Image: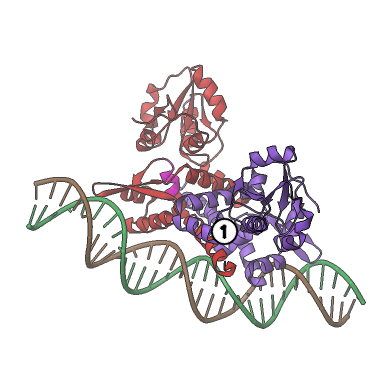
Chain colours: A red, B purple, C brown, D green
Amino acid sequence: MDDAVTKPMVFDQIARVGKALASGKRLELLDLLAQAERTVEALARAAGLGVTTVSAHLQTLKQGGLVATRKEGTRVYYRLASPAVARLYAAVRDVAVTHLADVAAAVTAFLGPGVENVTREQLLRRADRGEVTVIDVRPPEEYASGHIPGALSVPLDELPHRLEELPVDTEIVAYCRDAQCVLAPDAVRLLTDRGRPARQLADGMLEWRLAELPVEAGA
Amino acid sequence: MDDAVTKPMVFDQIARVGKALASGKRLELLDLLAQAERTVEALARAAGLGVTTVSAHLQTLKQGGLVATRKEGTRVYYRLASPAVARLYAAVRDVAVTHLADVAAAVTAFLGPGVENVTREQLLRRADRGEVTVIDVRPPEEYASGHIPGALSVPLDELPHRLEELPVDTEIVAYCRDAQCVLAPDAVRLLTDRGRPARQLADGMLEWRLAELPVEAGA
DNA sequence: ACACTATTCCATAGAACTTTGGAGGATGTG
DNA sequence: CACATCCTCCAAAGTTCTATGGAATAGTGT
């Protein structure tokens, strides 16, 4: 066994996974894919990048074994390769927000002033008793791909027009993609500004799936 | 809030963690640091790199919040910043061996023919009953920094000279750094070639710590 | 103060990565 | 079959990363 040759090779191979995580654009794509599978074009639109650029990034992610593909007619649907990848992505962000002061600062600047939140456990308990209305403020296709059982799909941009659909007597709990997602805080601020009692789930669908809690799919 | 500016910034910040994981050399350094804290020079020797190169890589790791430092006289000791980093490193390797066929191939080529192994649970049960002798075949400084309670320190290079110290009637279980570490398989092959009953722990000290099992420190 | 050690900082050449436009392949449609 | 759509492959330009010597800095011992 030639250690001098084979040992670095092992680490270089593993580094392919690291390289896949080494660009903000790719992390953004992963963030989207953690919510639902998508085509190359849909990803390009969502991330505001050129199609060829996205395709190139997706190749890098594929090289790292982070995403898998499915072909349907002329389209190619990308998805996370496995739940292990979601765990990895969560671990990366965990380290980032824990150890990088700048990240924490950027995140709060991005999220805006904090709003009151609820843990998964609290939500489960109170939802069982019918004490809260749970709304999913992500885009419809992400809701369709999997959501908290019993949650209503109310995409953030539709929320202003659909206030009357929501009961006035029970508290509203909004959730979105993950702990760093902006949609839920924005929704909660919008609701409380209109005098509705509202809070957000402390994290989002990513963490919900990782906790292996029940997920409902379909529109 | 200007999404077009702040959103990419968050991902770019998180990408600093990814960049830290994007080089085989840095992963090798992390691998070493997961076992014990070390000085720059010790790391350079262990990884076979120049001191300035290692220092530069360590700066990248620090930028990503993966390592922390401690100064003692003229030396600087580097260590993993937190257990969250060990979890992250384990998650990276998990994805690598699961999804990358080449990695799996490189690992087995590196480890040599498989030897029989034992899970942590089996080891705990059998060690309680005194049925096995557990040996730690890592370098002494890694043993000192933390090992399985009751394990003997028998560095791989000393093993041939110290065979008579080991009991002949009980089975020997060797362990080293982690699931991809070569030391334990080598030790087991050496022992079984000499007619001793021996197996290895399926993974290593990294996974033992992550499982939050008891750890003993000191020589 | 002086020599000495360990580490970091700096400059640089070479390698690798990102982005982009255009060509080309596969699939579905009129 | 011609044509449109969606995606990947290829090449080029600009940017970033890596490795490595030499200089600068901080701490130790005499």
Estimate the x, y position of residue B216 in percent, counting from the top left. 77, 46
Estimate the x, y position of residue A23 in percent, counting from the top left. 48, 57
Residue sitting nearer the eye, A80 or B149: B149
Q: Quadrant of the C terminus of chain A?
A: top left
Chain bearing mark 1: B
Estimate the x, y position of residue B138 in percent, counting from the top left. 70, 57
| Residue wearing tag 1 | B111
Relative to D19, A127 lies left or right = left
Q: Quadrant of the N terminus of chain A?
A: bottom right
Please tell me which residue is depicted at 50% across the width and 50% down the height of the picture: B95
Q: Is residue A15 visible?
A: no
Task: Classify mark 1: helix, strand or loop.
Answer: helix
Residue A34 forms part of the magenta stretch: yes
Relative to B116, A25 lies left or right = left
Q: Is residue B111 above or below residue A105?
A: below
Residue sitting nearer the eye, B178 or A87: B178
Report the magenta residues as a range: A30-35
Please tell me which residue is depicted at 45% across the width and 44% down the height of the picture: A82
Please tell me which residue is depicted at 39% across the width and 31% down the height of the picture: A159
Residue A176 forms part of the magenta stretch: no
Q: Main secondary structure of the magenta part?
A: helix
Q: Is residue A92 above or below residue A137?
A: below
Relative to D15, A103 lies left or right = right
Amino acid type, label 1: Leu
Q: Is residue A217 above or below residue B124?
A: above
Relative to D13, B143 lies left or right = right
Q: Say which quarter of the image contains residue B59.
A: bottom right
Estimate the x, y position of residue A200 in percent, counting from the top left. 51, 31
